[in-house]
C-alpha cells in the first residue's frame, strides 16, 4: 500500500511516500520504451524526511543529484538504490561547505537547479547551498533552456552581441539551433527590430530568384540538398559582406530561415508546377512511356494522362526510390529507345535501337536487336530533371544537345573516377 506523506506544489519535485510502512522518496524521470514516464523510489530515513519538508534548497539539490542515476537506468533498468541512498546524508544532513565539496565529486543536473531559481554566478563558483537560497517550488523551464543555450555557445567560443541575439530570437533559434526557424518579430526588442529587418532584407535580396527543388531520390517530399547549399551559401556570403560583425550563429540562422521557407514553398507546389525545363522544339511527344525500377515495378504513362510524363515519372521515383533501389528506366517501346538513370553513380544512359531483330530470335536465321548505349555524367538533381524532360518530350534525339555522350564503358568509368566518383 502506498500513501503520500509529503509533496510540493510542483508535480515533478520528488515526493515522500510511505510504502508498506517504509518511508521512500518517489520521483518521475526519464521514459520507458513506449515513451511513458518512469517512476523510481528508494528508501529514506525520518531525519531525511524532516529536512526535505522544511528545506526546499536541499530538497532540490537532492533531486538534481538523483536524476543522473535515473538516466543511468535507461528505459527499463532498475535504479541503483545503493547509490541513491548514499546521496542522502551528504546532501541533506551535512554542513553547507561539505555539501558543496560533495557536489564537486558527483554528477548532478544543473538545469534543474537553474529552472528553480538558482543564482547562476554562485553555481559557477561551486557555492551551491548559497546559490539555492532564493529557490522556488515553481520551475521556469525557459530560464533553464536559455542558460543551457548560453553555456553551449560559450563552450563553442561564441559571443553574441545585441543584434546577434535579436536575430536568433527573431528566427526562434536562440534556445535551440535545431528548431525550424520562423519569423517572429514580436520576440525582438522594438529598438532592434528595424536593424533585424534590414539584415533579413539583405538575405532576401541575396537569394532572390533562387529556389530549392524537389529530390525524388529521397522521397516525394524531399528537397534538393544541393539547391539548399547554394542558397545558404549565397545568403551567408551577402551577410558576411554587409554585416561582417555578425556572429556565425546569427548568420546561419538567417540562412536557415531563407532555405526553410524556400523548401516549404516547393513542398506546397504541385509537382507539375515544379517542372522547370521548357518544351523542346516540336512540343510534347505522343507515345506511351513505361517506367520501371530495379525491383521489377512498372508504371505506364499515356499521352491522355492528366499529368505530365515528367511529373508522373518523378512521382514514381519518389514512391519507389531506396538505398537498394536506385536504378530507374523510361522506355518508349514504339520507338525502341529509352533512358536509364543510375542514382548510385550520378549517371544516365540512353539506349537506342540501331537494328531491329530479324527472323525468329534465338532460332535458325534469327538475330537479336542491336542497341547503342551511351553514357553521361549527371550533375545533381537539376541536371537529371533537364535530361528526363528532354527525353519525355523529344526522345533520345532531343538528348543530343545535352552531351557529351560516351559510348565506351571503360572510358566512362575513367571519367567518373576523374570527377571523384559519386556526388552527393
Image (tube, grey):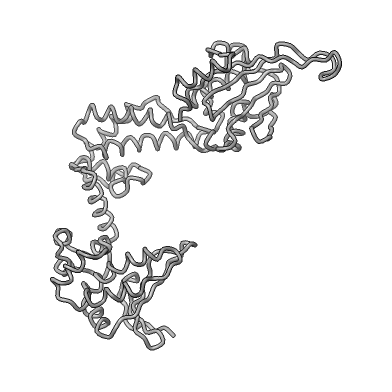
Indicate the quadrant containing the N terminus: top left, top right, bottom left or bottom right.
Answer: bottom left
Disc tally is 0
Indicate the quadrant containing the C terminus: top left, top right, bottom left or bottom right.
Answer: top left
* Residue 151, x across and y down, in percent: 23, 51
Q: Residue at x 36, y 71 (%)?
A: 80
Could you say which is closer to the camera, residue 101 or residue 143?
101
Extreme-bottom residue of the structure = 21
Determine whether, in the image, residue 19 is placed left or right of residue 133: right
Extreme-right residue of the structure = 364
* Residue 395, x across and y down, in percent: 64, 16
Q: Is residue 405 visible?
A: yes
Determine whether, in the image, residue 172 is placed left or right of residue 387: left
* Residue 108, x across and y down, in percent: 26, 64
Q: Quadrant of residue 357?
A: top right
Determine whether, in the image, residue 379 is placed left or right of residue 392: left
* Residue 215, x across and y down, in percent: 51, 32
Q: Residue at x 59, y 20 (%)?
A: 349
Q: Quadrant of residue 249?
A: top left
Could you say which is closer to the camera, residue 124 or residue 200?
124
Q: Is residue 191 visible?
A: no
Q: Quadrant of residue 261?
A: top left
Determine whether, in the image, residue 201 is placed left or right of residue 397: left
Amino acid at each position: 500500500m502506498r500513501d503520500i506523506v509529503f509533496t510540493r506544489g510542483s508535480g515533478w519535485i520528488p515526493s515522500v511516500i510511505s510504502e508498506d510502512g517504509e518511508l521512500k522518496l518517489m520521483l518521475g524521470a526519464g521514459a520507458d520504451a513506449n515513451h511513458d514516464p518512469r517512476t523510481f523510489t528508494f528508501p529514506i530515513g525520518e531525519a531525511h524526511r524532516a529536512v526535505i519538508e522544511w528545506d526546499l534548497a536541499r530538497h532540490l539539490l537532492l533531486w538534481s543529484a538523483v536524476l543522473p542515476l535515473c538516466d543511468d537506468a535507461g528505459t527499463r533498468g532498475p535504479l541503483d538504490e545503493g547509490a541513491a541512498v548514499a546521496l542522502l546524508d551528504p546532501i541533506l544532513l551535512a554542513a553547507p561547505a561539505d555539501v558543496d565539496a560533495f557536489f564537486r565529486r558527483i554528477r548532478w543536473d544543473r538545469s534543474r537547479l537553474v529552472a528553480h531559481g538558482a543564482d547562476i554566478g554562485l553555481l559557477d563558483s561551486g557555492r551551491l547551498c548559497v546559490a539555492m537560497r532564493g529557490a522556488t517550488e515553481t520551475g521556469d523551464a525557459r530560464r533553464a533552456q536559455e542558460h543551457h543555450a548560453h553555456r553551449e555557445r560559450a563552450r563553442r567560443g561564441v559571443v553574441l552581441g545585441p543584434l546577434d541575439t535579436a536575430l536568433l530570437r527573431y528566427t526562434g533559434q536562440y534556445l535551440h539551433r535545431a528548431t525550424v526557424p520562423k519569423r517572429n518579430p514580436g520576440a525582438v526588442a522594438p529598438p532592434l527590430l528595424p536593424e533585424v529587418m534590414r539584415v533579413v532584407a539583405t538575405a532576401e535580396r541575396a537569394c532572390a530568384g533562387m529556389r530549392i527543388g524537389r529530390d525524388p531520390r529521397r522521397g516525394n517530399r524531399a528537397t534538393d540538398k544541393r539547391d539548399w547549399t547554394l542558397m545558404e551559401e549565397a545568403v551567408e556570403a551577402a551577410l558576411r559582406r554587409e554585416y561582417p560583425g555578425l556572429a556565425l550563429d546569427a548568420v546561419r540562422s538567417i540562412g536557415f530561415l531563407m532555405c526553410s521557407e524556400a523548401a516549404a514553398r516547393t513542398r506546397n507546389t504541385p509537382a507539375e508546377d515544379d517542372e522547370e525545363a521548357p518544351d523542346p522544339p516540336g512540343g510534347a511527344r505522343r507515345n506511351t512511356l513505361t517506367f520501371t525500377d530495379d525491383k521489377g515495378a512498372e508504371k505506364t504513362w499515356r499521352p491522355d494522362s492528366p499529368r505530365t510524363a515528367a511529373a508522373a515519372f518523378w512521382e514514381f521515383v519518389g514512391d519507389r526510390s531506396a538505398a537498394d533501389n536506385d536504378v530507374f528506366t523510361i522506355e518508349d517501346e514504339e520507338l525502341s529507345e529509352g533512358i536509364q538513370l543510375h542514382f548510385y553513380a550520378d549517371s544516365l544512359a540512353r539506349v537506342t535501337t540501331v537494328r531491329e531483330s530479324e527472323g525468329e530470335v534465338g532460332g535458325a536465321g534469327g538475330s537479336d536487336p542491336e542497341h547503342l548505349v551511351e553514357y553521361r555524367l549527371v550533375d545533381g538533381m537539376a541536371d537529371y530533371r533537364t535530361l528526363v524532360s528532354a527525353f519525355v518530350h523529344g526522345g533520345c534525339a532531343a538528348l543530343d544537345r545535352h552531351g557529351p555522350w560516351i559510348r565506351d564503358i571503360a572510358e566512362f568509368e575513367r571519367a567518373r573516377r576523374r570527377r571523384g566518383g559519386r556526388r552527393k
